[in-house]
Image (cartoon, rainbow, N blue to C red):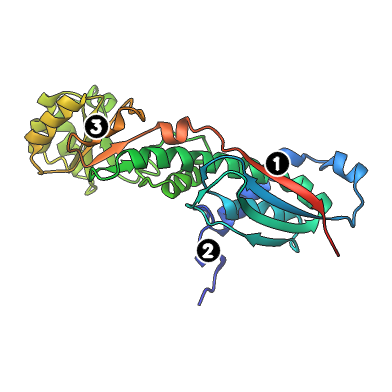
Amino acid sequence: MIDTLEALPPTAGLYRKGLDDFVARVLAEDLGIGGDVTTSSTIGADVRLSAQIRSRQDIVLAGVDLAVAFFMALDPQVRVERLVEDGARVQPDQPIMRLEGNARAMLAAERSALNTLQHLSGIATLTRQYADAVAGTGCTLLDTRKTVPGLRVIEKYAARMGGATNHRMRLDDGILIKDNHLALCDSVEQAVRSAKQSGLEVQVEVDLIEQIEPALRAGADRLLCDNMSPMKLRQAVALVNGRVPIEASGGVRLDTIRAIAESGVDFVSVGRITQSAPAADIGLDYTMASD
C-alpha cells in the first residue's frame, strides 16, 4: 500500500516533490506573471480542444508522462490517452498521445510539454543509435555527468530509455580518481590507497598503459581508460586480464564506438548522448472538441 507521495513511482526519474517543483519552475519560466495573454485575449474561457501529439521522424520516446504532467498542472480534468510508452520506437506521423481539455490551459502548457518531450526523446534517440552500435559485443554503454545543469535526473532517465546504463549521478555516488586528482598527488598508488579508506568503490582514470599496474597494486576496483585507441585498449584488456572491469571513455563517436567496444572493454561511456543530442521533431495538432 502506498502511504506517502514520495513512495509513488517516479515520473522520468523525478519523485513527487521533484516532479511538482520541475513542472512549476518550467511553467513559471514560460508563463511569467501574466500568463498566456495571447490565448486569454482570443480564446473563450470555456472552449475545449482535442489534440494529438505525433512524432514527425523516427525516434525513441522519452518523457511522455512528464509531458502529461504539464497539461494536468493547468487543467486537472484534461483527458489523456497515452498511445506509446517511453522507450518505444516511434515512426513518423505515429500518434503518441491524445488529449481533450480546456483550450486555454492546453495552449498555455503546450510549449513546456513539447520542449521537454522533444529534448528527452532526442537524447533517447541518439542513445539508441550508440546502443545499437555496440550490440553483440558484450560491452555496456554508459552515460556521463555531461548534462544540462538542473536537468541531470531527467536526461539520465532519457539515456536509460535509449538503452544506456547510468554512470554516476552525483560526485558522492562513488570515487573516480581522474588526471586532475593525480596531478595533485604524489603517485597513482598514493591516491588509490588514500581513496580506499573511504570504503567506496575506487575507479581510476589512466591514459597510459604504464599506470595500470600501479593502480591495480594499490587496490583500484575499476579502471577508466581515457582517450586510448582501440589498439591501446586491447593492450590494456590483455594486461588487466579480467582482474577488474575496464571502461573506455574520451571522444567516443558513433563511427568509432564499435571498434572501441570490440577491443574487449566492459564499458564505454559517451558524453555526447546527453551533451549533443538534437531535439526530436514532435508536434501537436489541435481540433475543436466534440461535445
Residue 114 in the image: state x and y as whole percent: 65, 43
> Disc 1 on helix, strand or loop?
helix
Amino acid marked by disc 3: Ile
Label 2's element?
Answer: helix
Q: Nearer the viewer, mark 2 or mark 1?
A: 1
Mark nearest the camera among 3 and 2 is: 3
Residue pointed to by mark 1: 111
The residue shown at (51%, 53%) is: 86
| Front label number (1 vs 3) | 3
Residue 198: x, y in percent?
Answer: 23, 46
Residue 115 lies left or right of residue 105; in this view the side is left
Identify the amino acid type marked 2. Glu
Q: Is residue 240 visible?
A: yes
Helix or strand or loop: what does disc 3 sit on?
Answer: helix
Residue receiving disc 3: 260
From mark 3 to mark 2, how far is it between C-alphas? 41 Å
* Residue 170 in the image, given as x and y percentages of width and height: 39, 42
Which residue is identified by label 2?
A: 6
Residue drawn at the location 46% of the way across and 48% of the way down: 157
Q: Is 180 placed left or right of 188 in the picture?
A: right
Quarter containing the C terminus: bottom right
| Side (left or right) of 210 relative to 94 | left
Closer to us: 270 or 186: 270
Residue at (26% x, 40% y) in the render:
267
| Residue type beneath disc 1 | Arg
Q: Is residue 230 above or below residue 70?
A: above
Res 25 seen here: no
55 and 201: which one is in front? 55
Earlier in the chain: of badge 2 and badge 1, it is 2
Crowding near the residue tagged with mark 3, few <14, some 14–19, many ≥20 C-alpha atoms within 10 Å: many
Q: Closer to the N terminus: mark 1 or mark 3?
A: 1
Q: Looking at the image, is 222 positioned above or below residue 189?
A: below
